[in-house]
C-alpha cells in the first residue's frame, strides 16, 4: 500500500457509527411502529451494501438535542420530551458527574488519591439517561470508570470522594478505591478493573431477580440490572457468553455499551471486525440498538424501552451508546495514548510515516472537535432554555449547589480518618497465619516495626 492511498483511508475521520442520515426514525419524538419496540435493531441491519462498505467513510450524522427540538417544533407536536422537574433532575445529575470528575483530577494531581483513576467527562448522558430511570432495588454494574455511575445511582458524593481518598468513610471503607465503588444499599454491585469482569456479575444479578420472581414466587420482584462497559470490552469472551445466557433465559438485564471509540490507545475501528456492536444483539436473539450517547433525551427514550422490556419479563436488550471521553484514558495518561504516531506499520518509509502521522493528527483533532461541539451538558442546557423549561438563573443555581456538594465532599474526605492497620487483612479469606498474624496471635501489621523502612500503609 502506498502512503497516499493509506492516508486517504485514514483521513476520513471523524466518523460516526450511525450509518444512516437522521430521519424521523431517529427521532425519539416519533413513536415507533407498533410491530416492534426496537425497530432500530432491524432497521440498522437493513443497510445498503454501499453504506456497509463505507464504514470508514461516514461523516457525523447524529442528531443533536437541538435538532430534535427543531424537528419537534416544525411538526408542532405539543408535548415536550420531558417535564421541567425531569429536565432539572437530568441537568443536576450531569453537572454533578462533570463537577465531581473535574474535582477528582485536581485532587489526584495534589496527591490526595492513589492508584489509577479513570474519569467519565463527556459520557454523562449515558449514566444519567439510564440510571435516573431506575428504582432503588434495581442494580447497576460498572467498570473502572465508575464514579459517575455511583453518583447517578444515589451514592452520596461524600462516600465516593472518601473512597477515592482511601478513607474509612468511603463507600467501601477505603478498601476499594477508584475502580471498585460498591454500595449494597444502592444496589451498585461494583466497579470492576478487569474488563468484562462485571458482565457475568450483572447477568447473575439479573438471574437472581428472575429466580426470585418465578421460582420463589416473589411476585413484586421485577428488578432490572444494567451492565455498563466499553467498546473495547465487547471483543472479550464474557460479553458473548453473557449475551447468550441472558437471551436464553430471558433475563431482566440491559447491556449498555459506552462506545467512546477508543480502548486506551486502540481505535475501535482498528480492533473490531464489525464495529457496529448493536448488531450482536439480534445475533443472540435480543434487540440491539444504536443511540446517540451525547444526547441525554435520546438515551433516556431508548433506556425507557429497554428497562421497560426487562421489567415486563420480555428479556434483555443490547444498547450501544455512541459517546466520547473528553480526557485521557486515566489520569496517569494525559491523553498521549490516542497518539497519531502509534501502531504505524514498521515497513513504511520515514516519509510515509511522517505523512500518516500528520493525517492522523488532523483527523484526531477533528474527531475531538466534533464531539466537543456536541457536549451533552451544553446540549441539554440549550434544550431546557429554548423550551422554557428552565431559566439561566435556575441552571446557575444548580451549578452553585453542585459546586458546594463537591467541595463539601472533598472537605469531608480530607477530614475523615484513614483505616486502621488491622483492616488490611479483613476480607482476606486465605489463612493469614505465618504472614499476617504473629505467634502471639496479633496482627503483625499492628506492630509499627512491620512497615518500618517500607511505604506507609
Ligand atoms: C481482562 C483485561 N484485559 C486487559 C485490561 C487492560 N485494559 C484496561 S482498560 C482497557 C481498555 C478498555 O476499553 P473500553 O472497554 O473501550 O473502555 P473505556 O476505557 O473506553 O471506557 C484495557 C484493555 C484489563 N483491565 N482487563
Ligand atoms: Mg472505549
Image (cartoon, rainbow, N blue to C red):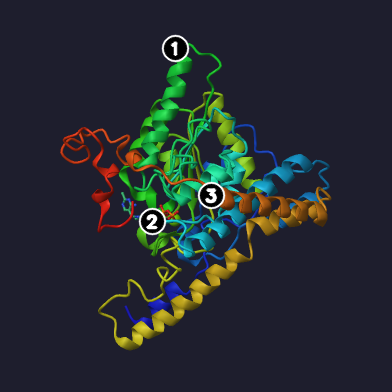
Residue 219 image position (x, y, % from top left): 54, 14
The answer to whether mark 1 and mark 2 are in CB contact below 8 A is: no
* Residue 181 seen by the camera: yes
Residue at 60%, 65% in the rendered image: 372
Horizontal arrangement in the rendering, residue 200 relative to residue 91 (left or right): left
Residue under label 2: 115
Q: Earlier in the sequence, mark 3 or mark 2?
A: 2
Q: Is mark 1 within 8 Å of ligand 1?
A: no
Please state the horizontal and vertical placement of residue 281, each as a whole percent of the image.
44, 40
Location of mark 1 (residue): 216
Q: Is residue 283 left or right of residue 434?
A: right
SS type, badge 3: helix
Residue 202 falls in which quadrant of the image? top left
Point 44% across, 48% down: residue: 166
Where is residue 298 shown, x and y percent of the image? 64, 47
Residue that label 3 marks: 415
Q: Residue at x 60, y 50 (%)?
A: 125
Residue 303: numbered disc: none
| Front disc: 1 or 2 | 2
Q: CA distance from mark 1 to mark 3?
A: 46 Å
* Camera-nearest residue between 140 and 190: 190
Disc 1 and disc 2: Cα gap in Å?
42 Å
Amino acid at each position: 500500500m502506498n502512503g497516499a492511498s493509506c492516508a486517504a483511508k485514514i483521513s476520513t475521520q471523524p466518523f460516526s457509527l450511525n450509518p444512516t442520515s437522521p430521519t424521523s426514525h431517529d427521532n425519539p419524538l416519533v413513536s415507533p411502529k407498533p410491530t416492534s419496540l426496537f425497530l432500530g435493531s432491524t432497521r440498522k441491519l437493513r443497510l445498503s451494501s454501499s453504506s456497509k462498505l463505507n464504514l470508514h467513510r461516514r461523516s457525523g450524522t447524529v442528531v443533536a438535542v437541538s435538532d430534535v427540538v427543531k424537528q419537534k417544533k416544525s411538526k408542532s407536536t405539543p408535548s415536550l420530551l420531558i417535564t421541567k422537574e425531569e429536565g432539572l433532575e437530568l441537568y443536576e445529575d450531569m453537572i454533578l458527574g462533570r463537577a465531581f470528575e473535574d474535582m477528582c483530577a485536581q485532587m489526584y494531581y495534589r496527591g490526595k488519591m492513589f492508584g489509577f483513576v479513570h474519569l467519565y467527562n463527556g459520557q454523562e448522558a449515558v449514566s444519567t439517561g439510564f440510571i435516573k430511570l431506575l428504582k432503588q432495588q434495581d442494580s447497576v454494574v460498572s467498570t473502572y470508570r465508575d464514579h459517575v455511575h455511583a453518583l447517578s445511582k444515589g451514592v452520596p458524593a461524600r462516600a465516593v470522594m472518601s473512597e477515592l481518598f482511601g478513607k474509612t468513610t468511603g463507600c467501601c471503607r477505603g478498601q476499594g478505591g477508584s475502580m471498585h465503588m460498591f454500595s449494597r444499599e444502592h444496589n451498585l454491585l461494583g466497579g470492576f478493573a478487569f474488563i468484562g469482569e462485571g458482565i457475568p456479575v450483572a447477568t447473575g444479578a439479573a438471574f437472581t431477580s428472575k429466580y426470585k420472581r418465578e421460582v420463589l414466587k416473589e411476585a413484586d420482584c421485577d428488578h432490572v440490572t444494567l451492565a455498563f462497559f466499553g467498546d473495547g470490552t465487547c471483543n472479550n469472551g464474557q460479553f458473548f457468553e453473557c449475551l447468550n445466557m441472558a437471551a436464553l433465559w430471558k433475563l431482566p438485564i440491559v447491556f449498555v455499551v459506552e462506545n467512546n471509540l477508543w480502548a486506551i490507545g486502540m481505535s475501535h475501528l482498528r480492533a473490531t471486525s464489525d464495529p457496529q456492536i448493536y448488531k450482536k444483539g439480534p445475533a443472540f436473539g435480543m434487540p440491539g440498538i444504536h443511540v446517540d450517547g451525547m444526547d441525554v433525551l435520546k438515551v433516556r427514550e431508548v433506556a425507557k424501552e429497554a428497562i421497560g422490556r426487562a421489567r415486563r419479563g420480555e428479556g434483555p436488550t443490547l444498547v450501544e451508546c455512541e459517546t466520547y471521553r473528553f480526557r485521557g484514558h486515566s489520569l496517569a495518561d494525559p491523553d498521549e495514548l490516542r497518539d497519531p504516531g502509534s501502531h504505524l506499520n514498521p515497513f513504511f518509509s520515514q516519509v510515509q510515516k511522517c505523512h500518516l502521522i500528520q493525517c492522523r493528527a488532523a483527523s484526531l483533532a477533528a474527531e475531538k472537535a466534533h464531539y466537543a461541539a456536541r457536549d451533552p451538558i451544553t446540549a441539554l442546557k440549550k434544550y431546557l432554555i429554548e423550551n422554557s423549561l428552565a431559566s439561566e438563573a435556575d441552571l446557575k443555581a444548580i451549578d452553585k449547589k453542585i459546586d458546594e456538594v463537591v467541595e463539601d465532599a472533598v472537605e469531608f474526605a480530607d477530614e475523615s480518618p484513614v483505616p486502621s492497620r488491622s483492616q488490611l487483612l479483613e476480607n482476606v479469606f486465605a489463612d493469614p497465619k505465618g504472614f499476617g498474624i504473629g505467634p502471639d496471635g496479633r496482627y503483625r501489621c499492628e506492630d509499627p516495626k512491620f512497615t518500618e523502612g517500607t511505604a506507609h500503609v
